[in-house]
Amino acid sequence: MRIIHENLYQFLNIFIPLLYLKNIHQETVIYSVNDSIKMKLRVGTYDKWAIYQIWKFGDYKTKGFHINPKDIIIDIGGHIGSFSIWAAKQAHQGQVFTFEPNIENFNLLQENKRLNDVSNLTAFNLAVAHKKGEITLFNSKHQNMGHSFYEDDLSSKAIVQATSLAEILQSNKIKKVDLLKIDAEGAEYQILLNTPAKILNKVTKIILEYHDYLNHGYTYQDIKKYLSACGFEVELDTNVFQRKVFKIGILKAIRKN
């Protein structure tokens, strides 16, 4: 597990700085994603790569996951707002609820929300876990890349407030979720496997990034099995290299009719 974890960071530590060659002496920069979208990001960090994944590589532009104008979307792991803003622009008559526990990421997410004048996006400085309360969050020391509920030798820690998927639906009076997106650095297992079927019955589609390299006692197979039992048709992305070498990947689930 540690070798795979280290290899992933070593690869990104080489690649990420190449994205900022023009801005090497700046701390932050306003990046024009396209003619209508601008994102503030931190030079030398994972921020631009996250934007590329959403806007350039189309990680969430996948068959069966088209976002409709009136969709209700929950984004767990909002980072700096790349996915949330992209989704909110498409669901312009709907609503996006995004959750980001890291305060630096959250503040930048709020700046990007204002920068793009997105009124149908509501952001919360909260982690999402199996229950409401305080949890320990381990923050990556590598370029603001992520945070996790699981400790390793690359992390520092902070106590943060957490909510649950059931609490999100109840407190925001959400009766139906058209799309649930999760990129929570290992918390996906805790979140989904502890969410009752009666709550998941309110969700139409789920797309998540799984992180098996964290060696937390679960794998994507556990999520696949549970979601299948809850009435979803589940499939994995086709990137076998990423799944085998880095033990990460994308899992997609659509509720059966």
Image (spheres, helix red, strand yellow):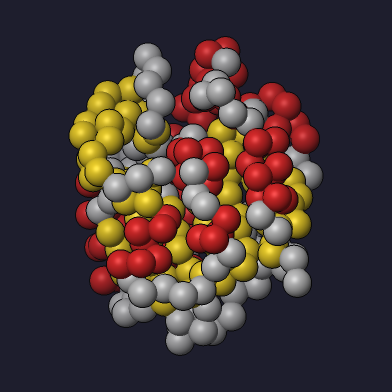
Quarter holding the C terminus?
bottom right
Residue 112 at x, y percent in the picture: 31, 64
Which image quarter: residue 218? Answer: top right
Height in image: 47 above or below 159? below
Residue 194 at x, y percent in the picture: 49, 43
Count of all numbered marks drawn on residues in the image: 0
Height in image: 253 above or below 73? above
Which image quarter: residue 143? Answer: top left
Q: Which residue is drawn at 69% across and 44% down?
A: 224
In the depicted view, which residue is nearer to us: 15 or 149?
149
Residue 95 at x, y percent in the picture: 42, 77
Q: Which residue is drawn at 70% across and 58% down?
A: 232
Q: Residue at x 32, y 79 (%)?
A: 119
Height in image: 73 above or below 133? below
In the depicted view, which residue is nearer to us: 190 or 54?
190
Q: Can residue 44 be seen in this view?
A: no
Which image quarter: residue 138? Answer: top left
Residue 122 at x, y percent in the picture: 31, 69
Q: Residue at x 39, y 33 (%)?
A: 148
In the rendered structure, the answer to whether residue 168 lies left or right of residue 180 reads: left
Height in image: 199 above or below 136? below
Quarter holding the N terminus?
top right
Q: Can residue 96 be seen in this view?
A: yes
